[in-house]
Amino acid sequence: MKFNNLKQYFFIMISLALLLQFQTLVAGSNNLKIQQVEIAIPSPSIPYYHFKMKIDNKNQKPFRIKKIIANGKEIHHYEMRDESWNKGDDKSFHFSWPVFAIDLFGDFVYKNPCLIGRLDWENGQKYNIEVTYSIKGSDDEETITQEVVAPGKGGYWNTKWKYYKSIVVSEDYGLDRKNEPVEFSLVFYPDQITDISKELRIVQIDKNGNTKVLPSQVYNVQKYLKEDKARHGDDGKLRPFYWLPSVYAKVVVPISIEEKSNTVLLAFYGNPKAEKPEIKSNLKVTGEGLGLTIENEFYKVKLHPESGMLHEVTLKDKPELTLEHKLETNGAIHWNPGAYSPKRPWMHASDWNPPENFETISGPIMFTLHRKGHMPNMPEIALAITYKFFGNSPFILMSTALEIKKTIPLQALRNAEIVFNHKLIDKAAWQDPTSDDPIIINLDDVPNLTEIHLPLDVSWVSFINSKEKLGFAGIPLEYTNSSLNNEPFDYDPYMYITKGPWVYWTRVLVTPYMTQNIQQIIEVPEGNCYWEKWAWMPFELNSGDEFEQLDDLQERLKHPLRIQLTDERDARVRIPDEIYTDPTKTGWEEMDK
């Protein structure tokens, strides 16, 4: 009897030990639990098709994601977030992590962990999601699974297009935007595209999953197709490539968005059978060489046939009156950059005949003319000028870049000059940012060659034909003066308006010629650079608030829409070894042998 009791005792003890061990194993296999899984449409917070898995990490230990499988297919693009970071799906997300930081997720304890995986789901499809992970400090891997059904609408836009990138567009300044041209850059793997100009589709998706294909234009396509050579480690395994062939492109697309809101654009590609989309456009370009005529629903502009400078401007609502100059030299409206270095004559970019190089970008959304060369008769000064015209916008963008290639003595260096025949212009107006109301000057109330000074940070400046209620405005958007050698170089910079048989406005960079000591001369040193960007707009003066449209345009252009790009992580991505560890070496010495 005692023997039996002892036997029973040992049996009970062994059973309890096994039970405790089993409970420990069960607890270990449930370090993480799934609280909730949902499949969702792209949103400003998560701008791609995705699943969102809320996780209960009851032990509050760091964990690493090893693999994610959805319906047998591995998901390479994922991220961990804490639910407390989320400010709402309609808000853009301000954190991102480079791909080489993904493993560091496993060193951080999320209070409310949320796993987000890119899942290009289709309507109503059932998905079995398996997440394999390990707790930090343990070599054991465990898997949690959940089956979930996708919503009945809002799924992947079109499966003929295999790939997409995401762009979040944000309006943060309280300004409604309509057909505002937005430019951004994209980079592709060349084996995923055939002809990006044919394949690309920009799809806008709203909060309900409804989609709209927007007109778009691809330009400045550049290819880097050199391949890194294969390298193997001491273990004989192929090491990650340090670079892969890539294709770069810029895209311009008109965006309409309400104030204080965000929207998601999906840039689809990877459909070699796609045909180039037909886009209705009111942007029309005619002519040959530099003597082009560009028009849209707002204006008609002619460029000078010798220099390509702005030459004639007609507002479509006022076709009976053309604004022009045509008094001095070539008669262009746009003259500068310009410089005077005696004994040489005063020269301007408008004296190009022709510029050394020019190129155009033509499409249904935007037409661009880019010219570059040296100041005529002054090889010491290199310069470039770019015009951009848009189909649905009343303004023209102009930018100039000027570089002093060799130190040059100057009595004048100016930029941003616009010149009209005085017979067509009787008033000038500008908005001082410190004033509530515009300042308006009757030009015939001052003597010829009077300089009417403007603040350097003037909001806008305009010339007016008050009889015809027609104006031409300039909005300075960016100005930079820099140097490759020492401090940026200028002398008494200011802006002014003056009149004679013509009227013009201009920006002074270095110009003792306009001072009381006209004979002084200044050497502008090699390496100095000047960059400037303006918007030009012909406009009709409205009854009531004549300049409201200028204030509105200035606000929109000075506060552009914000762009946030999210690339997809490709399955081929591997993290290369760090090589830039010794400042005396490149890191490639041994690898290139």
Image (tube, grey):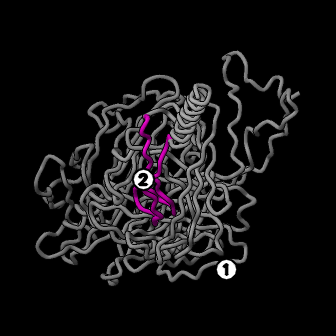
Q: Amino acid at mark 1?
A: Glu
Of badges 2 and 1, nearer the viewer stands: 2
State left or right for residue 262 relative to residue 309. left
Residue 17 picture quarter: top right
In front here: 243 or 530? 243
Query: What are the residue bounds of the magenta stretch?
Result: 31-59
Element type where label 2 sits in the image: strand
Q: Who's the residue at 43% across and 51% down the image? A: 54
Relative depth, front residue between 221 and 362: 221
Disc 2 vs disc 1: Cβ atoms closer than 8 Å? Answer: no
Position of 56 compared to 124: left or right? Answer: left
Label 1 belongs to which residue? 275
> Residue 415 location in percent, x, y?
40, 47
Of the two numbered discs 2 and 1 on the same chain, state the one appearing first in sequence: 2
Q: Residue shown at 47%/22% (left/top)?
A: 486
Checking the image for residue 35, the label placed there is 2
Crowding around mark 2 (Cα neighbors within 10 Å: few <14, some 14 to 19, many 20+) is few
**Residue 270, image x and y in percent?**
68, 67
- Indicate the position of residue 520 as horizontal and vertical percent values: 37, 28
Residue 381 appears in the picture as rendered: no
**Left or right: 452, with 528 as reference point:** left
Q: Quadrant of the N terminus?
A: top right
> How many numbered circles does the render carry?
2
Q: Quadrant of the C terminus?
A: top right
Q: Which residue reaches farthest front? A: 1
Residue 239 left/right relative to 143: right
Badge 2 amino acid = Gln
